[in-house]
Amino acid sequence: MSSSWVRMAAARDHAIRYGFIVLLFGLIAYFAIAADGFVSPQSAVFIFQSVAITGVLALGVTATLVVGGFDLSIGSVATSAMMAAAYVMVVLEQNAVVAVVACLLIGAVVGLINGWLIVYMRVPDLLATLGMMFLLVGLQRIPTEGRSIATGMTMPDGSVANGTFGSAFLALGRHRFDFFIPNLIPVSVVVLLVLAVLIWFFLEYTRFGRMMYAVGSNERAAELAGAPVKAYKIWAYVISGVFASIGGILLAARLGRGDIASGNNLLLDAVAAALIGYAVLGAAKPNAFGTAVGAVFVGVLLQGLTMMNAPYYTQDFIKGVVLVVALVFTFALSGRGKR
Amino acid sequence: MGKDAVFRVDGLRKSFGHIEVLGGVSLDLHAGEVTVLMGANGAGKSTLVKIISGVYERDGGTMSLAGHDFATQDFALKDFAPNTPAEAIRAGVVTVHQNINDGVVADLDVATNLTLDRLSGSGAPTLFNPGRVRREAKAVADRMGLTIDLKARISDLSLADRQMVAIARAMAHRPKVLILDEPTSSLSSAEADRLFALLDRLREQGVAILYISHRMSDIRRLADRIVSMRDGVISGVFDRKPLDYEGAVNAMLGRKIRLDRIVARNSAKPVLTIDGLRIAEGARPISLTLGDGEVVAITGLVGVGKTALAETLFGVRKPLSGTMALNGKPYAPGSTGEAIAAGVFLVAKDRGENGIVGDFNIQENISLPFHKRMSHLGVLKRRVERATARQQIRELGIVCRSEKDEMSALSGGNQQKVMVARWMSQAAKLFILDEPFQGVDISARRDIAAKLRASANGRATLLFVTELDEALETADRILVMSEQTIVGEHRNADIDLERLLAEVAGGPLHSAA
């Protein structure tokens, strides 16, 4: 009697652990049969490309989730970085390197301010980063009086901006590396993969990552174990800000202009990927591998449905369903949520 | 004896994962009797209490509670199966949990806390009437002899006052069965006396009381009957007067306890020197020296500054004045990190709050402060981490399946051993333990104390304990703290207990002034 109970518990453990991975492969298998041309290198690359920017943002927000925080400003950091890149190249007529450096700086500075607000001003994380989100959404419109930035635009003072996006910068969005097939893998996918491996290694294998998890689980215990808790928290927001600005650079490079209307969905998609990641391998906590799988999961689902002619307006609904199911996996089934 | 049971537990079973915690527990509680439940760590006391109070679901067995229908004189036992704590309370089974903050709402005032269950119960008026709440609260407080300001916020009260409010709140239900889980662990002796007086009154009123404690003095004072638990089953019931305390302890431990006498050691080589240290406004300065190989215990009531002194030594807070020196070199830690780097380690009190990282397993909890020493270029050397954990598990006798076990799967005593193991895994110059035996049963306490004494050479060891027994069992030298300073010193050999107790109570301080 007790052995059957043990077997049931073990089966449940397995379901929690591998459920989402199995679901992912099931989904791929289903689309492979149901949707023509789903299984091809081009289709796989397209999926990765479609989630590359949200994936980068999601990896960044994972760092703040690990220390028990949250960053709602990532979407607006990304769009601010995009606008800044366009402004630097088109209006200030600088080269690609300057634009990239400016974007990364913006991300780091916003992260520092977020961290300072949360750690030293004691503003709750959700509120501090919500405030920062509003601030940035407004700030990025001020230099151009709310207009998008493109070569030949008229500035508020009547002059015409003649700068252009450098070809090196545009390559970040348009160049494709050869991988068995010529011109297969876009730069953004490479960036996503490299950052995913980096943050995964950092969180899982370095002492800094380990201590970030300790801070997230029991801040007081981490402090009494000698960790500079405040610094770890601030660093988490800096990582999040910098990753978001990298996402913004990729977005600018893809669009080739500073589009005031783009990037609306970045925040929600990225947060969804990171939260879906909780359910992967039964981690029940933020983790980089899960976040990456979560992003790919959403990409596979949307690509498959698109190829089966599901209307575009159902996309957000489907993402929401996936997120809710993943959260049920994490909190109800594994029993980790309640303390 | 002869009395009818008002509450009965029969064949209760509970497992967590693969670990069986209760293997068929049967227990009767009688009206107007205090039943003391004793058990070592991992015996299953807390689990039993949580099932009775509706926090956990049982896997098997039955519980029944006497009816209270006075009209029909129907007092027969009825099936009792609470699904939630609220259901248990409504049925007349009230529990005061060990964790005080579970019993009070920190952001509300005392009056609201005392009447909270009535406010949230069905039939409570929709509109909040502050005047009525205060009147009802005053009635509850008066019955209890509670003298706390009813308008004070719980978060501003001391731990002891919070405990009194939590108990008073439980009393407001006029329970049929009252369960108290180590209620005196943070009370001073005067406060404990008030609690005992109240329990006497409740006993006379016919309440069946289940009292869980490790304190022999509490048990001698209160018990009508002792039930011992071991390894998830009842291992002995003692109800013949005079009660066989020794038998109860033996049934709980499953072996004869040895009363080890400490052979007090002297130390020649000073490790820590404190000179003129003031830890609070208006407090007299503290000066003391701790020697190599010496185990020193600082005892004193709750709130006399023991934790403040521990935190000052560990760099959590700064002294108002005075100097410290470690092995002759000036020592003024600005952070916990600096203290650890200097070789000063602290096992903080209240492991749940200050020690355990819940998301980490045993191995990760042990390595926590020493990541730097266990990594190369920032990358953790997991093999070293695992080897360290395994060695500590062996040395402290931590009962677990492997170093990968979750902390929540361990009993309180074993969790505390992990906390001690964390800081024993590296060599300390000064090893501080603040209330290391809090919520730890006698056998785990003996293991930890023996380990501390056996490994004492090469460092100074400083314990902060409220319980005098713990100091007598462990230390070479006992210092007494009162009003944020040291008021007495005793070598643990032929101790003048009367003088020591007077110092604890604060007497000599005034005569010295």
Image (cartoon, coloured by chain):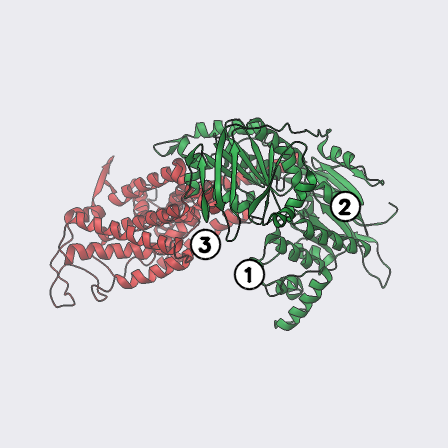
Chain colours: A red, B green
Give the alpha-carbon distance from disc 1 to disc 3, as whole Å: 37 Å
- The residue lying at 31 percent from left, 62 percent from top is A135
Does label 2 or label 1 sit earlier along the sequence?
A: 1
- The residue lying at 44 percent from left, 27 percent from top is B383
Asked whether, in this view, residue B2 is left or right of residue B22, the answer is right
- The residue lying at 64 percent from left, 37 percent from top is B470
- Amino acid type at circle 3 is Val
- Label disc, if present, on residue B107 of the rendered structure: 1
Residue B122, horizontal then vertical, whole percent: 67, 66
Instruction: Evaluate whether label 1 is on the same chain as label 3.
Output: no
Q: Numbered disc 2: what chain?
A: B
> Callout 3: few (<14), some (14-19), or many (20+) C-alpha neighbours within 10 Å?
few
Residue at disc 3, secondary structure? helix
Give the alpha-carbon distance from disc 2 to disc 3, as whole Å: 60 Å
Asked whether, in this view, residue A235 is left or right of residue B413, the answer is left
Of B145 and A127, the residue lying toward us: B145
- Amino acid type at circle 2 is Arg
Of B321 and B315, the residue lying toward us: B321
